[in-house]
Image: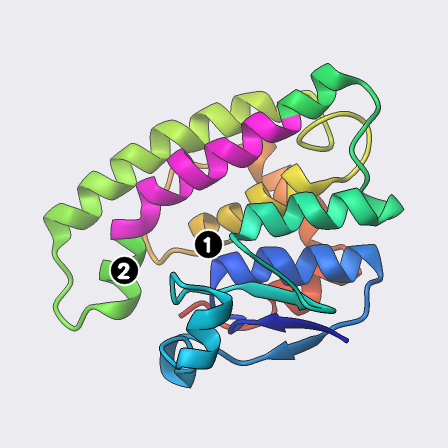
Amino acid sequence: MRKLWGRLTSVNVQKAVWALDEAGLAYERIEAGGAHGVVDDPAYRAKNPNGLVPTLEEDGFVLWESNAILRYVAAIAPALAYPADPRERAQIEQWLDWQATTFTPAMRDAFWQLYRSSNPDQTVIAASLKRTEALAAILDAHLSDRNYAIGQTFGIADIALGCAAHRWLNLPAERVERPALRRWYERIAARPAAARALGEPIA
C-alpha cells in the first residue's frame, strides 16, 4: 500500500499529492506536520530523519524531498513521464531546482510573516516581496509564449512551479501583475488533480 505522509497546507505536500493524482496512483495520505505532529515521533524519524513532510512510503521503499518524489512519480507513471529529448529533460530539472532553491525560498519570509506571525515585520515582508517579484518576472517572461513550463505537455515542472505560484499569487500583498504567469497558473490550476492539492486554505 502506498502512503504519503504530510498535511495539505504544506506546499511541498501539495506537489506530491498533485503528482500522485495526475499519475492516477492510489495512495493513502496520513496527516503529519504542523498541528498534526507525528514528524518528531521516533517511528516517523526512522523514515525521514529530517522530520519534515512529505514522505512517500511504498512497499518498504521510503522517499523524502518533494521534488525527488516528483521525479520518482515521473519515472513510474506514463502520464508524467519525462520527454525523450535529454535537453528538454534537463530543462525540467533546471526549473525544479529553481523552484526549490530560488523561487520558494525568496517568498518564504513574506509567507511566514503574513500567515504565521502574530506581529508581522513589514521590513522583512517588503524585502521578501522584492526578491520574489524579480523571480516572478523571470517566470512570467519564460511563460510568455508557452502553455506549459517545458515542452508541449503538462509535466512535473508545472506541478512544482504551480504550487509555488499558487502561494505567491494568493499572498495578501500587492504584486505586479504578470499576465503570462497568471494565464499559465489558471490553466494548470483548473486541472482536476490540482483541486485536491490546492483546495485547502493557505495557512
x, y percentage for residue 174? 33, 47
Q: Which residues are magenta?
A: 92-109
What secondary structure prevails in the magenta region? helix
Q: Position of residue 111 (x, y in %)?
A: 31, 56
> Badge 1: how crowded within 10 Å, few (<14), some, or many (20+)?
some
Q: Residue at x 47, y 24 (%)?
A: 138
Q: CA distance from mark 2 to mark 1?
A: 11 Å
Horizontal side of 82 relative to 69 (left or right) equals: right
Judge by depth and name the residue closer to the eye, 163 or 58: 58
Q: Earlier in the sequence, mark 2 or mark 1?
A: 2
Q: Quadrant of the C terminus?
A: bottom left
Q: Residue at x 63, y 52 (%)?
A: 69
In the image, residue 97 sits, relative to residue 175, either above or below, namely: above
* Quarter of the figure with the N terminus: bottom right
Determine which of the numbered discs, if any, sits on residue 128 in the image.
Answer: none
The residue nearer to you, when weighing 91 against 190, is 91
The residue drawn where x is 67% and y is 43% is 71
Label 1 SS: helix
Q: Could you say which disc has been placed on residue 167 in the image? A: 1
With respect to residue 115, does 68 lie above or below? above
Quarter of the rendering containing residue 191: bottom right
Is residue 40 visible in this depiction of the protein?
yes
Q: Position of residue 11 (x, y in %)?
A: 49, 58
Question: Which type of secondary structure does the marked residue at label 2 adopt?
Answer: helix
Residue occupying the point 70% across, 47% down:
72
Q: Nearer the viewer, residue 54 or 170?
A: 54
Q: Amino acid at mark 2?
A: Trp
Whether residue 93 appears in magenta in the rendering, the answer is: yes
Give the residue number, with chain letter if any, for mark 2: 112
Identity of the amino acid at label 1?
A: Arg
Would you say 54 lies left or right of 79 here?
left
Report crowding for label 2: few under 14, some 14 to 19, many 20 or more residues within 10 A (C-alpha).
some
